[in-house]
Image: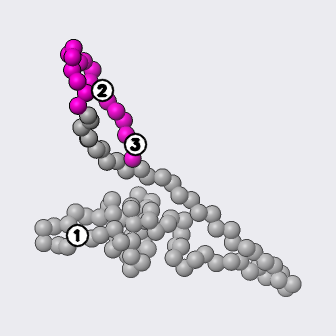
Amino acid sequence: MIERRIEPEELPEGAKFNGYREYDVQDLRLLRHNIRYLLAEYVTTEGRTITGKLPDQQQGHYGATLQAFVLYQHAPLPSATAPAKTLPQLAHPSNSKTTRRRVLIT
């Protein structure tokens, strides 16, 4: 947390300091987080190339958190009777890859 002390612009003569009144402001920081996978490549004596595979959870060039965030931004607002979807529900692998791609490229 960052604290900033702010003094009044004008004070009458003889005013005595009485402490600080706390006023909290919440904000959000979004930072890019890139992961570079170095997929090892080997060439066999027959000339065939063997390459390391990405982890199963890595689908395409967008991470699960970014996909979930974008889906969350584009999710329809819940009605009063429908249960709201949480961010982990939107990130669940059962969501259509086609839908995720369509949202990410629009």
Can you see residue 79? yes
Q: Residue at x 24, y 18 (%)?
A: 10
Q: Nearer the viewer, residue 104 or 78?
A: 78
Q: Nearer the viewer, mark 1 or mark 3?
A: 3
Element type where label 3 sits in the image = loop
Residue 64, position as x, y percentages in the image: 46, 68
The picture places residue 27, in percent across and down from the top left corner, at 34, 47
Which quadrant holds the C terminus? bottom left
Mark yes or no: residue 102 visible: no
Name above or below for residue 17 compared with residue 101. Answer: above
Please give the residue where the numbered disc 1 appears in the rendered image: 84
Residue 31 position (above or below residue 6): below
Q: Quick one: label 2, few (<14), some, or many (20+) residues within 10 Å?
A: few
Assess disc 1: are there few (<14), some (14-19) or many (≥20) residues with their C-alpha within 10 Å of its C-alpha: few
The reply, left or right, for residue 87 in relation to residue 15 is: right
Query: Could you tell me the amino acid type at mark 2?
Result: Glu
Q: How far separated are the C-alphas under marks 2 and 1?
A: 44 Å
Q: Which residue is mark 3?
A: 2
2 or 3: tag closer to the N-terminus: 3
Q: Which residues are magenta?
A: 1-18
Per the image, label 1 sits on a secondary structure element best described as loop
Provide the major secondary structure of the magenta segment.
Answer: loop
Q: Is residue 34 above or below residue 40?
A: above
Q: Which residue position holds label 2?
A: 7
In the current view of this chain or complex, which residue is farthest to the left?
A: 80
Q: Is residue 10 magenta?
A: yes
Where residue 28 appears, x then y in whole percent? Answer: 37, 50
Is residue 66 highlighted in magenta? no
